[in-house]
Image (tube, rainbow, N blue to C red):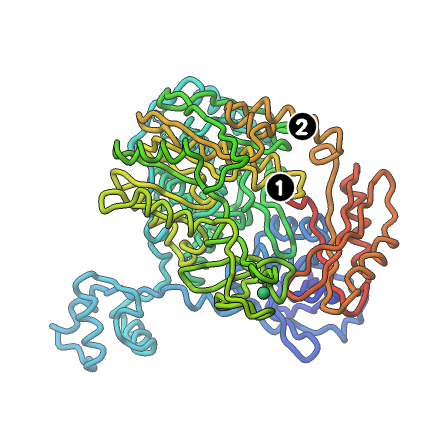
Amino acid sequence: MASIAQVEPLTSARALRGPFDYALPEEMRERVGVGSMLVVPFGHRELLGVVVGLTEASSVDRERLLAPRRTVEADVPVDLVELAGWIALEYCSTPARALSLVLAPGAGSGVHSLARLVAELTAAGREAPAAGVRLTAVQRAVLDRLADAGSAPAAATGAAHGTLRRLEARGLVRLHRRPLARAPEHVAVGSRTAGTVTLGADQRRALDGVCEAVAARRFDELLLHGVTGSGKTEVYLRAAQAVLEQGRGVIVLVPEIGLTPQTVGRFVARFGETVAVAHSRLGAGERYDEWMRLRRGEARICVGPRSAVFAPIEDLGLIVIDEEHDSSYKHEGDPRYDARHVAARRARQAGAVLLCGSATPRPESYARLRRLVLASRVDGAPLPAVEVLDMCGASGALHERTAAALGALRRGGGKAIVLLNRRGWSNFLSCRSCGKVWGCPECDVALVLHRADGMISCHHCGHRQRVPASCDACGSSSVARHGFGNERLEHELVAALGGDDYPIFRLDADVAGAKGRAASVLARFERAPAGVLVGTQMVAKGHDFDGVGLGVVLDADATLRFPDFRAEERTFALVAQLAGRAGRGGTDGRVLVQTLTPGARSIVAAARHDSEGFLAGELERRRALRYPPYGELIRIVCSSDREGVALAAARELRSRLTLTDAQLLGPAPLFRLRGRERAQIVIKAADRLAAVAAVGEAVAVPLHRDASISVDVDPQ
Ligand code: ADP
Ligand code: ZN
Ligand code: ZN
């Protein structure tokens, strides 16, 4: 048994890089392996660390090696330690930061003690009060309280921990940690069929394709390209079943649980206790419990958002990525990992099948993956007719045809979804007399009016201030509001259509801020016999509502105005996904798309439901410009709160980068964010490994005392 552990201390400091050697005392050797968590002395501190290797030889004299203080429960599986090592390199991050992704939730912070302790009455305990066993008043009260249900959470017994332990010592109660009844309330939103269904021919063929790959028990990647409502989830469920029957485990990634409760609900309904849900709404203790259930193999399926790709499932057979085009799969903190890319790596490592599903797949997936197609909706209904409305010269928010369609729907008592991908009331305020525009003091962007709060706020840093009554530059009290966002749109729709029998629901990040609110808005819209749901892209996620007769997209080209090579892809997906919400469950659907650029390729293709045509054109364009998947992109941002430093650091960094067969763009200044100037370099490279390695090397050496660097491989 190895006597020296190589430990990576978990610290976010970039400069501190392990692993460091520690001498294992005899009694630890048997218990400690790769993935074990240890508390180790480090300088004057104690740090939590993960064992990444074992050895007999160290470059440090054996007598000088320190011993770990203690071990911590919840060790990490070896394959996840390996995966973290890969992530650290792949995303130019540090081993410690990458390891922190794969640990048990709250590991080392004492969270596990929060896990719910359950007290259960034993047979002796049940008889004790009547049998005249000597009991204190408190003990008696605990036994009484437990008598009804037989068991209860320790906290609910009203007794102190010591009391319960003493009762346990006397054999009157049993204490154990119980995984909580997971998945708190899965508000049932938009799922029609409860029982099992007979697969359609397309679904059958797709499932056969997946099952064949699963049976081969080796790495494979598939794309389930199915129009909205074509029954993709049913294919995931059956594929998961097949994998469980092989005795292997499954990970199902979903965009956001709050917005896709129905997918989670269907997995829980089908597989019960076998499912662990990684839900941000769970408390730290509950998340830890779910993690342990997976770790111990009590649960074999994990459903959750991007971080579920790190679920501690042994012998993984399948990873499903639902709505694989969704931007939430990219993590926006260091390491800036992409759960889709990590999932592919993990599937390869485990010899598992990766199944990506979407109605609007990414061009990368379309080009790279073997495709299984679901061409039509389960109910056989045609996709709704889409009409593009030119807004050039229009003044109000709604085109007259949109207003007319909404009016007709109101009279007929139908439902509509209206999408405007902008929060707030007005985009910005300006002074009518001197032209001042109210901007964020920390960022170079305009502040957005949120009328209900009486605030103007920055959508980048969260800065808020009161709505000005007059201009602080010239004193004029004439302040103009420009543009419109969801809050104002809701207000106008209420004025035009609203009534007791015709509710208008709004769903955006402001409304959904409180946990669980999004699901409740969606559930109320579903239950309402008629009404309008208005909101940001949140309203276009995979909901499956009956009876939506009209879908409207306002300012469909807003996403096109971003200087971003994914602008077309995003616009197409947004329109196509919204169109997918209309005309389900026997209702005729119709979609109106308001835009200033009715001829834009992405909008024309979305209006024709021509996903393949769009993807083919998009891939051609990307090939010409050497964008992904025909080239690799890496973005490096230098930032500083001192003037001029960001740009200077970026220049210095650029001079360090020597790359062949790659294009270096920049440094280019970016707008100031959170009080920091920023400058970016973009690398377009043919060879990913070489580019990542070169960047990793360049950023490993400190650049400038006052500059920080962030590296984004595969920026979104
Ligand atoms: P998608 O994920 O492709 O948008 P879903 O899987 O949500 O589609 O399926 C849409 C609806 O059709 C769901 O309510 C689902 O239960 C139902 N469904 C799926 N497959 C079938 C089938 N073979 N027969 C009848 N209903 C089905
Ligand atoms: Zn002014
Ligand atoms: Zn700001």
| Residue 705 sits in quarter | bottom right
Q: Image quadrant for the C terminus?
A: top right
Q: Residues within 10 Å of mark 1 (few under 14, many from 20)?
A: few
* Sequence-first disc among 2 and 1: 1
Note whether residue 627 is visible. Answer: yes
Q: Secondary structure at mark 2?
A: helix
Q: Position of residue 214 (x, y in %)?
A: 52, 29
Residue 303 in view here: no
The numbered mark at residue 561 is 1
* Quarter containing the N terminus: bottom right
User: Residue at point 38% right, 38% down?
Assistant: 417
Percent across and percent down for residue 306 are 53, 47
Residue placed at 52% from the left, 31% from the top?
390
Q: Nearer the viewer, residue 143 or 412?
A: 412
Ligand 3 occupies quarter? bottom right
Residue 698: x %, y % from top left? 82, 55
Counting other residues with Cα less than 10 Å from the Cα at mark 2, is it few (<14), some (14-19), or many (20 or more)?
A: many
Q: Nearer the viewer, residue 339 or 406?
A: 406
Label 1: element kind: helix
Tell me the number on the disc at residue 619: 2
| Residue type for callout 2 | Leu
Outermost top residue: 201
Amino acid at circle 1: Arg
